[in-house]
Amino acid sequence: MKLSVWTYEGPPHVGAMRVATGMKGVHFVLHAPQGDTYADLLFTMIERRKQRPPVTYTTFQARDLGSDTAELFKTAAREAYERFQPEVLLVGASCTAELIQDDPAGIAAAIGLPVPVVPVELSAYQRKENWGAGETFYQLVRACCPKEGVERLPRTGPSCNLLGPTALGFRHRDDVAEITRLLGRLGVDVNVTAPLGASPADLARLPQADFNVVLYPEIGEPVARWLKRNHGQEAVAATPIGVGGTADFVKQVAELAGVDPAPVLEESGARLPWYSRSIDSTYLTGKRVFVFGDATHALAAARVATEELGFEVVGLGTYSREQARDVRKAAKRYGVEALITDDHLEVEDRIAELHPELVLGTQMERHIAKRLGLPCAIISAPVHVHDYPARYSPQMGFEGANVLFDTWVHPLMMGLEEHLLGMFREDFEFADGAAPSHLGHAPKASAPAELEGPAAADPQAADPAAADPAAEGRAESLAAETAPSASASTASASTASAASASASSASAPEAPPSGEPSWTREAQKELKKIPFFVRGKARRNTERFARERGFASITLETLYEAKAHFAGRR
Amino acid sequence: MSAPNPAIAGGAALPVLKERGQREVFCGLTGIVWLHRKMQDAFFLVIGSRTCAHLLQSAAGVMIFAEPRFATAILEEKDLAGLADANEEIDRVVARVLRRRPEVRQLFLVGSCPSEVIKLDLSRAAARLSQQHGPDVQVLAYSGSGIETTFTQGEDACLASMLRAQGPSEDAGDDLLVVGTLPDVVEDQLQRLFDQLGVPVRFFPPRRARSAPPVGRGTRYLLAQPFLAETGLALNDLGARHLPAPFPLGAEGTRAWLQAAATEYGVDPARFEEVVAPAEARARRALAPMRERLAGKRIFFFPDSQLEIPIARFLAREVGMELVEVGTPYLQRDHLGPELALLPDGVQLSEGQDVERQLDRCRAAAPDMVVCGLGLANPLEVEGMTTKWSIELVFTPVQGFEQAGDLAELFARPLVRRERLKV
C-alpha cells in the first residue's frame, strides 16, 4: 500500500476516457462500481466541455455482486450501442471491476454488435492515467488502422500526423492550433490529429501521412512506434516548447518534409528573445528555479529556464516514471539530482530544502509554493480549471514561448521594482513581505528556511489556510519532517533569536550541540538588512560557508566572507 | 402549527418510480470532504485504489489549501497478489500517518470498493490498531464504498461507526441530541435557540471526535440530516429515542423541527412563540422576494444527496415552485415520513436512477430548473436548461431560520444570471 494525499495522475481508465472523449464516434463502456461516474465532472467542470463524456458506466452495487455483474455489463453495452450508435465501442474495467474478472472483452464480443469492439486492459493496480491514455490510443489505432496497404495520398505538399493530444490535456487545444499553424507556414499539411478530434475512420488514414509529430510522447509514443514499424513513418523527436525547442522542431520537420526552414525561423514571431535581452530582464539572471511536471514539460521547462531566461535550475523532477531516464540524464547536465516520484510530500520536502526563487510545477507545486511563500508558475498537468483559459494560450511553438515568458515572469518582481526595493529597504513601506506591486496580496511568510522567530507566521494573512487549524498542524509537521538543511536553518534561526532575546554576548557564543554554526547578534541584524527575497539565499550560503569551515558562530565577518566567496557564482 | 403526525405519513399515495441503470452519483467516500472539516482531530484513511484518491481530490475540487486530514492507502499489485500482508501494510501506513499528524485523536479506516471486494476486514484492523495506539488515538472503521453507499450515506456509515464504538451510557442524562453534520455557524444558531427554549442540547458529530456526547436510555434525538438511516438504528440500539419531524430547511421546516423538541421537553407554548416567532418572521421576510422570482417555476431533481425531498417540500410550500420530478438515490421512509406528508399531492418521486432515461424525461418535461450533479450540469446548460448543482446544497449552510433565504437564493441565482447575461 502506498500512502497518498494528492495524486499527480488519475487511474488508467481516466486516461482511456480522455482518449474516448477527445475522439468522435467512439463510445466507452466502463465496468465500474457506483461512484466512478465522478470522472465525468473532470470533463464537464474542469475542462468545461459542452457534452458529457461518451462513457457508459455499469455502476454495479454490492447486491449485484451476488447476482450477475456480467449480465449488467452486457445490458449496458447493448443499450449504449443502441442509444449512441458509435462507430467503435471501447470496453474496459475500472479498478474494482478488474477484481471481479467479468471479462468485458469477451462479453462485448459475444453480443455480436455490428461495429468493432475494442477492449483495453488497464492494469489499474500497476498503471496510471497517462499510460492508460497511451494504451487506449494504441489499441484503437491497432483496431482501426490497416497494418499494410495504405497508400500515401498524392498531395501537393508534404503531410504529417499530430499524435498525442486528448481531452482534458494541459493546453492541448491551443498547442494543436499553434503547431498546425506553424506546420502550415512550413508548407506541411496536417493529415490527421489524433486522438483529439479524430474519428475511427481518421485513424485508418494515419498511414497516408509522410511522417508523424508526437506532441505528447507520454500518450502518442506507442502509436508512433507502431506506425514506424508497420508503415515506415518517421517521427519528429523534438518537443516544440520554447524558442530553441521550436527551432529544433522546425528544422527536423523541414528535413523530413524536404522544405526550407529558413523563412519560418527568420520570421518566427517570438518576442521572448528580445524581452529576455531587454535590460529589465537583467534581474532574472541566475534566479534559482525548481522544475517539476510530466517528463515532456519538465525537460522543456528546464531548457527554456536556463537557455532562454537565464535562470539557474536547482531542482528537476518528474512524476512520469516511464520517462525517468531522460529526466535523470538532463538533471545530470544541470548538475542537480533528479527527483523521480509521484509522492507530492517528497516534492514538498525538496522544495523546502532548496528554497528556490521560482517554482515551475503543477497545481500540486502551486499549493506547496503558496504554503512556502514562493512564486510559482504552472507548466504541466495535473490540470485545474485555471488551465483552460478563455484566451488563446498555447505552451508550444513561438507563440507558446511568448506565453511562457509572460507566465513565468509574472509571479516575480519587475526588474525596476526589485532595484527600488534594494534602494529603499530601510523604508517601512518596503518591509518584509512586500509583494510584487502587480500582485494583490502578500506572500505568506511561512517558509521554514525563512522563519524569523515567532512572528513569522502572520495570523492576519489573507490566506484561508491561515484560519485553518490544519495549516498550523501542517507547519509543525513540516518543520519536524523537512530535510536536514531546512530544519537546520529553522534551528539556527531560533537559536539566533534566542541569542538576541537574551542579549547576552555580541561576540561568538558557543556552537549549539548539533554542531551547526550559530549567528551572532550583529550578523543576524545585518542579515535583516538584506532584501527579504534574497535573504534566504544569503542565510543558506553563509551557513554553508561557515559549516564547511567548521565555524562555531557566524559573525559579521563570516557574513561578508561568505558573500565574497559566493560572488560571481550566480 | 403542530408537528405532523408520522402515522399519517409514508407517502403511500405518492407514485414512486423505481429505476436501475447507470447512476450518476458520488460514492460515500465523498463525505470525508466535509466530515474531516467538522471533526478537526479526526483523520480519514481510505484503504482503496488510485481511483479513490483521485475522486477525493476531484470532489474536494479546489484542492484544499492546507494538507487535508485525509489520505488514501493505495492498493498495489503486491497487495492483491498476497505478497504483502494487508494487516502489516495497514499498520505501517497508519503509523506513518500518526507520526506525521501527532494531533490526530481519532482515525477512521475507510473501506472502499476494492477493499470490500477483496474482503479486507477493516473492523478487526481497527480494533487491533486501537490497542496499539490507544488510549491517545482511537481507530474506527466504516465503509464509504460505492458498492454499498451513495454520497451522503458515507456520513451515515461514519456516524454509526462512532456510536457503535461508544456503547450505551448509564449517565447520559436526558439531553437532546441533534444528529448530522451541520456547519458550525448553523450549529451555533440552533444552540442559541435551544438555550432560549431551555432544552439541553448536544450535537453529533462533535467538533472534536473524541468528545462525543454520551448516549443512553434518556437520550432523545432530532435528525438534522435526512440520510442517517444506520445512525438512527445505532442510536436506537443505545436506547435513544427518535423525535420524528420534518427537517430544519425553510421557515416551516425549522419551526416544525424545533416544535418536536419543544413538545417533547414540555416547553411552554408561549415561550416557544416568544423565541421562535421573531426568527421565523425574519426568515419569511427573507423569503418574500425569492418567492416572487421562483413561484410557478417548474423544477426537476436528479438524485444526489437524499436532501432532495426536504428541499423540494420547502421549494413547493414556501416559495411556490412546481415539482416536476423529485429524484432521490434512496427513499428512506422511516425518517422522511413527516416530509412526505407535506409534499403536494401527486408529485412524481423517483428512487434510484437510470440516468439516460431520466435525462429523456427531463428533456421532455422542459423544466425551468434542473437540480443535478456536476457531471450533468454544464451539458444541460448547453441544451438551454437552467441548472443548480446539487453538491452546493450539501456544502452550503442552508438549515435553520437564518439560512432559509439563502437556500431559496441558491435556486434564484441561476435564473437571475440567465436573465442578466446578454452574451
Image (cartoon, rainbow, N blue to C red):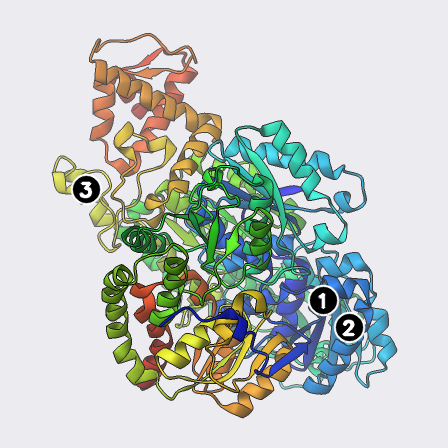
Residue highlighted by disc 1: A60
Of pointers 2 and 3, the one earlier in the residue sequence:
2
Reading the image, the residue beneath label 2 is: A72
Q: Chain of mark 2?
A: A
| Percent coordinates x, y for residue A224 in the rendering | 71, 65
In which quadrant of the rendered view does residue A525 lie? Answer: top left
Q: Position of residue B198 (x, y in %)?
A: 31, 50
Dot 3 or dot 1, earlier in sequence: 1
From the image, which quarter does the N terminus of chain B lie in? bottom left
Q: Which residue is mark 3?
A: A421
Query: What secondary structure is marked by label 3?
Result: helix
Is residue A536 depicted above or below A2 in this figure? above
Q: Residues within 10 Å of mark 3 (few under 14, many from 20)?
A: some
Task: Count residues near mark 1 (Cα–Cα under 10 Å), then give few for <14, some for 14-19, many for 20+.
Answer: many
Q: CA distance from mark 2 to mark 1?
A: 8 Å
Rendered image quadrant of residue A243: bottom left
> Is label 2 or label 3 in front?
2
Dot 3: chain letter? A
Q: Could you say where residue B228 lies in the image, as x and y percent from the top left?
A: 54, 59
Q: Is residue B408 visible?
A: yes
